[in-house]
Image: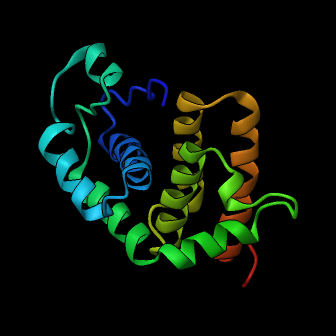
Amino acid sequence: MSTPPKPAGRPRTGARVAAVQALFQSEQSGETAETVAQQFIRHRIGAGEGDDAFDEGRVPLAHIPLFEAILKAAATRAEATDAEIRAHLQRDWTLERLDPVLRALLRAAAAELMSGKEPPARVVINEYLDIVRGFLDEETSRFANGVLDAMAHTLRPTEFGAAR
């Protein structure tokens, strides 16, 4: 994984960055999201300051309750979040074909969008687009934008002026 975006002064963005990193680590290591969450809380969130902290995979400022909520939702609704992502991929793309960082990001975003009406869908989309730009290239950011926008319209249609 490349250097994550620096969410200085934005603890909710920090929580989302940490959630993406934790979901990535969980998938790569085979450890449960709950185990990885505890590791992050003990060793990565709030640990260290300055640019070096981010370069070393730490997130100095992160809203821990949001971080835990995203991970819990992604873990307990794993099949539903993956199904939602698959439903919004082009026919020739599979979830397994996606970059693992993008897959973790889409899972976190889907879990958050499925969890209720707050924050607004547009906020969720913008937050995760900021994060994807910190990890991946512009083409992948555009791809993520399309999937996030389509998921948001499906999961929260009333926010976009349509009933589901």
Residue furthest toward the top? Answer: 51
- Which percent across, then down, holds residue 23? 41, 53
Judge from the rendering whether residue 103 lies leftward or rightward of residue 118; answer left or right. Answer: right
Q: Quadrant of residue 106?
A: bottom right
Q: Which quadrant does the C terminus fall into?
A: bottom right
Q: In front: 55, or 134?
A: 55
State the residue at coordinates (28%, 15%). Answer: 52
Quadrant in the picture for residue 10:
top left
Give the residue at the far left of this rendering: 42
Q: Decide: is 6 above or below 71.
A: above
Task: Estimate the x, y position of residue 131 in percent, counting from the top left.
Answer: 51, 37
Q: Position of residue 115 (x, y in %)?
A: 45, 74
Q: Residue furthest bottom?
A: 164
Please count the marks in the image.
Answer: 0
1 lies above or below 150: above
Viewer-proximal residue among 98 and 55: 98
The answer to whether residue 156 shows anywhere in this view is: no
Residue farthest to the right, as pictured: 91
Name the colour scheme: rainbow
The relative height of residue 139 versus residue 75 in the rendered view (above or below) is above
Could you tell whether 96 is left or right of 50 in the image?
right
At 56% from the left and 79% from the top, the residue drawn is 80
Residue 54 visible in the snapshot: yes
x 55%, y 71%: residue:
81
Horizontally, residue 133 falls left or right of residue 67, namely: right
Rendered residue at 61%/31% (across/down)? 136
Q: Is residue 29 left or right of residue 137?
A: left
Q: Position of residue 24 (x, y in %)?
A: 44, 48
Q: Nearer the viewer, residue 124 or 41?
A: 41
